Every structure is written in C-alpha cells, then in structure tokens.
Image (cartoon, rainbow, N blue to C red):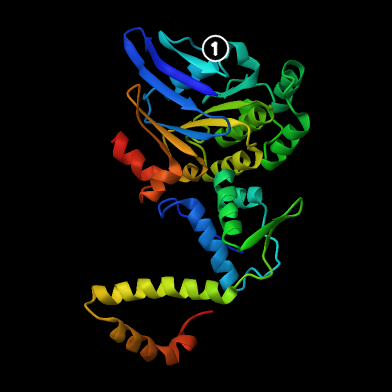
Amino acid sequence: MRLRVDPEAGPIFEQIVAGVKAAIARGELSPGEKLPSARTLAEELKVNPNTVIRAFLDLEREGITETRRGLGTFVREDVDQTALKHELLLTAARRYLKAAKELGLDAKAAARALLEVEPDAGSKQPT
Amino acid sequence: MLEASNLHKRYLKTPALQGVDFSIPQGQVVGLLGLNGAGKTTLLKLVAGLLLPDRGAVRFQGEPPRKHRGRIVYLPEQNPWPEGATPAQVARLFSGTDPGFDGDRFHSLLAFLEVPARPFGQMSKGQRARANLALALARRAPLYLLDEPLAGIDLISRDRILKALVREWREEATLILSTHEVGEAEALFDRAIFLKEGRVVKDVLAEELRKEGKSVVETFKEVLA
C-alpha cells in the first residue's frame, strides 16, 4: 500500500482514511490483509502517530477494518470493494463534472467526451 | 500537565517574553513556532527551569520545573558537549546520573540515526544534531523540549530526525519542538503555538486548521509576516 499525505490538503487523518479506502478499491490491499502498524505508518509518512490512530479508529467505525487484539489492524473480510470503488468513482466524477461546468458544458457533454476518449484511453495511458 | 501563566522575561532592557500563557496536556506534540528572536529559546528555558521568569510562573505537574529537572529533557540548539567528547562518553555520564537513561534505546537510536563514533568536534552539523537527538530521546522522561532540532541541517538528517521522533514518541510523553522553518515538520504537530515578539499570537490544533483549509505553514506566513 502506498499512501501520501499533503498537510496543505485538509486534515491528515481524513487523507489517511481516504488513502486506505482507495488502496482497497484498487486491490492494493485485500480483504483480510494486515495494515502496517500505526507507528510504522506514522514513521513512513512522518506524521503524528495520534493522527494515524485517529484514522484507524475512523476506518474501524466505518466497518472497513477491524482490530484483532495483539495482532494488529486488518481489512475486514466482508469489506465492500464494489461500494468503495463506486465511492471513489463518484469523487472523480464530481471533479470531472466541475471541470466541464467551468467550461460552460453540462453533464451530457461531459459524458459524450468520456465515450469519445474511451477507445484509445487504454492504449495511451501508461499502466 | 504543563501550565505557563503570564510569563515575562527581559534581558537588560530587551523584553524577550511579554505575558505568555498556555496549558499543554500530557501526550501532546506541540510546535513552538516563530521567527528568530521571537522568544522561543527563552520560553523553552523557562519551561526547563533553566531560567526564572521576571513575572508569572511555569507549573509542571503542579510544581515549579526546577523540582523536576531530571524529568525534563531539554535539547539546546547549540551542541552543549566538549568538542573532544564522543556521544558514547556523554551517554556514560547520563547513565550514571539519570535513572531514566536507557542504554539499549541509545544504541538503537545511534544506529537508526547513523551517528558516527567520533568526537563531536569531528562531526558535521547534521551528525551533531543527530547525536544530540539520540542522547535526548534515550532518556525516558515525561517532557521533552527540543530547541530548533532541524535548523540549518541537511535534508537527509532532517528526514531521519523526524522519523526518529515519530518512532520514539510514546503517548504519555509531551514534546515541544521549536522551529522557525515549519516545512516538513508540520505533520508531526498536534498543536501549533505561534510566538511573535514575546507574545503568543495564535494557538491552534493542527488538524482543526486543516479542516478550515489551511496548513500550519500557510498560517505561519500569515500570522508572523
């Protein structure tokens, strides 16, 4: 799992929550997989361990992860990857729609543009 | 756990602190932020009990800090050790006088911070800073005061120092770190206290600030400019 935080982009604990969800949605973290410890993740990101702990509590409350006593924090087996994917997709869609609206175009025009670029999107984008 | 009320301090005719108040609970990581000459070092020395205020008082666990000298770790900005001394020699000194000094922890910190086994006088500035941090963090204490541990040292040393701080942080320990370059340290702070001309001009929780769409770095520029 690769996470990034940017102190200029809103609360760090929210960014960690979003980052873990995105990792699950992309399949970088699988159901049942163990997350790095709060301390390890804090060290890697150079953030306050309290902040990571707060993010982990949030993930647990949302039913994304669970803490097994003495073992660590794990992605729940029943985590809904489809729902997480959808949530991420909607976020990206909102950003895209906003960009379209700034050009004075509506959702329909935006959707048409998506289909227009779709055939070659796969070949042009590096994976 | 740590209270400062109405702290005043002047050097001859120059006022250094002009009425500083704050209250810091146990376990908080506080950035004490201000430009050079804002009073950061004076404030840390008062909290450490190394200076006495002209007016006002500091209370650590309800008592003057002088009563807790051995339990407050103060890391000055300048290397306090003789040029000819090695970190290992200083560590021996500590292990004889400070029951909180943890030798194993010191050795693991030396390795993690890549401190060379040479006298302080033969180290680079970054190496000296890392050596002093290893010595400071190897002491188990409820309060750590670090004066500009990141100032003027290379990027790699700064990175290591920040990682060591996260690694060694224990939830019961309170840490106050002063700096005039917020930069990459900002994600470490629970709270930021901005000091300007001897006064607290802003005192905020870092995540609250970010909720309002601001970073500590931006706020630093805003309030201290």
Seen in the picture, residue A38 relative to B51 is either above or below; the reply is below
Q: Is residue A94 left or right of residue A22?
A: left
Q: Is residue B9 left or right of residue B124?
A: left
Residue B192: percent from left, percent from top: 43, 36
Residue A63: percent from left, percent from top: 60, 63
Residue that appears at 39% across and 12% down: B9
Residue that appears at 63% across and 37% down: B169
Seen in the picture, residue A60 relative to B30 is either above or below; the reply is below
Q: Is residue B201 left or right of residue A119?
A: left
Q: Nearer the viewer, residue B171 or B124?
A: B171
Q: Report crowding for label 1: few under 14, some 14 to 19, many 20 or more residues within 10 A (C-alpha).
A: some
Residue B161 shows in the view = yes
Residue A15: percent from left, percent from top: 49, 57
- Quadrant in which the N terminus of chain B appears: top right
Which amino acid type corresponds to the residue marked 1 in the rendered image?
Pro
Extreme left residue here? Answer: A104
In the picture of the structure, the residue carrying the numbered disc 1 is: B64
Asked which secondary structure carries label 1, the reply is loop
Chain letter of the residue beneath label 1 in the structure image: B
Seen in the picture, residue B179 relative to B50 is either above or below; the reply is below
Q: Nearer the viewer, residue B79 or B185?
A: B185
Q: Nearer the viewer, residue B12 or B124?
A: B12
Residue A26 shows in the view = no
Residue that appears at 51% across and 19% down: B47
- Using the rendered view, name the quadrant where residue B12 is placed: top left
